[in-house]
């Protein structure tokens, strides 16, 4: 078994429906608003598993972005990591639905 992010639909009780949604997905997306409030609202980050370890990176190219290039990327990525490590909800990169932000054994 290995851990992976999974996209599943949920029923009206909020329970995951087996074999629904996109299934295993390579990464999840999340908005910087969750940890950076308005400062990073709309700035998208992605989380993936590399050799079973959580890795977080930004979606945007910080060097060419006049707003983001004012921030220390390493520090912000660390904040994003600490946030998503303990958070519940992220976005599926395929269908845009909410997905569990925690990887599962599949
Ligand atoms: Zn999906």
Image (cartoon, rainbow, N blue to C red):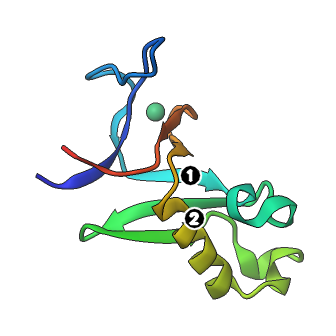
On the image, the x and y values in percent for residue 93 come to 52, 43
Task: Decide: few, some or many residues near mark 2? Use Cα within 10 Å; few <14, some 14-19, many ≥20.
Answer: some
On the image, the x and y values in percent for residue 94 come to 50, 37
* Residue at the image position 38 percent from the left and 22 percent from the top: 15
* Residue at the image position 62 percent from the left and 75 percent from the top: 79
State the quadrant of the C terminus.
Answer: top left
Q: Residue furthest left?
A: 1
On the image, the x and y values in percent for residue 70 come to 85, 85
Along the line of sight, the residue nearer the viewer: 79 or 65: 79
10 up-or-down from 32: above or below: above
Horizontally, is 81 left or right of 38 in the view? left
* Residue at the image position 50 percent from the left and 69 percent from the top: 56
| N-terminal-most mark, 2 or 1 | 1
* Residue at the image position 36 percent from the left and 24 percent from the top: 16
Q: Secondary structure at mark 2?
A: helix
Q: Nearer the viewer, mark 2 or mark 1?
A: 2
102 up-or-down from 84: above or below: above
Label annotation for residue 62: none
Instruction: Confirm or deny contact between disc 2 and disc 1 (CB under 8 A).
Output: no
Task: Decide: few, some or many residues near mark 1? Use Cα within 10 Å; few <14, some 14-19, many ≥20.
Answer: many
Horizontally, is 19 left or right of 13 in the view? left
Along the line of sight, the residue nearer the viewer: 10 or 24: 10
Label annotation for residue 29: 1
Between the residue at mark 2 and the residue at mark 1, the CA separation in whole angstroms equals 13 Å
Q: Secondary structure at mark 1?
A: strand
Mark 2, residue position: 83
């Amino acid at each position: 078994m290995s851990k992976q992010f999974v996209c599943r639909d949920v029923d009206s009780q909020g329970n995951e429906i087996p074999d629904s949604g996109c299934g295993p997905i390579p990464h999840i997306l999340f908005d910087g608003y969750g940890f950076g409030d308005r400062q990073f609202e709309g700035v998208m980050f992605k989380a993936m598993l590399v050799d079973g370890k959580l890795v977080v990176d930004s979606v945007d190219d910080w060097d060419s972005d006049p707003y983001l290039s004012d921030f220390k990327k390493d520090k912000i990525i660390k904040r994003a990591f600490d946030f998503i490590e303990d958070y519940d909800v992220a976005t599926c990169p395929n269908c845009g639905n909410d997905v569990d932000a925690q990887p599962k054994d599949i």
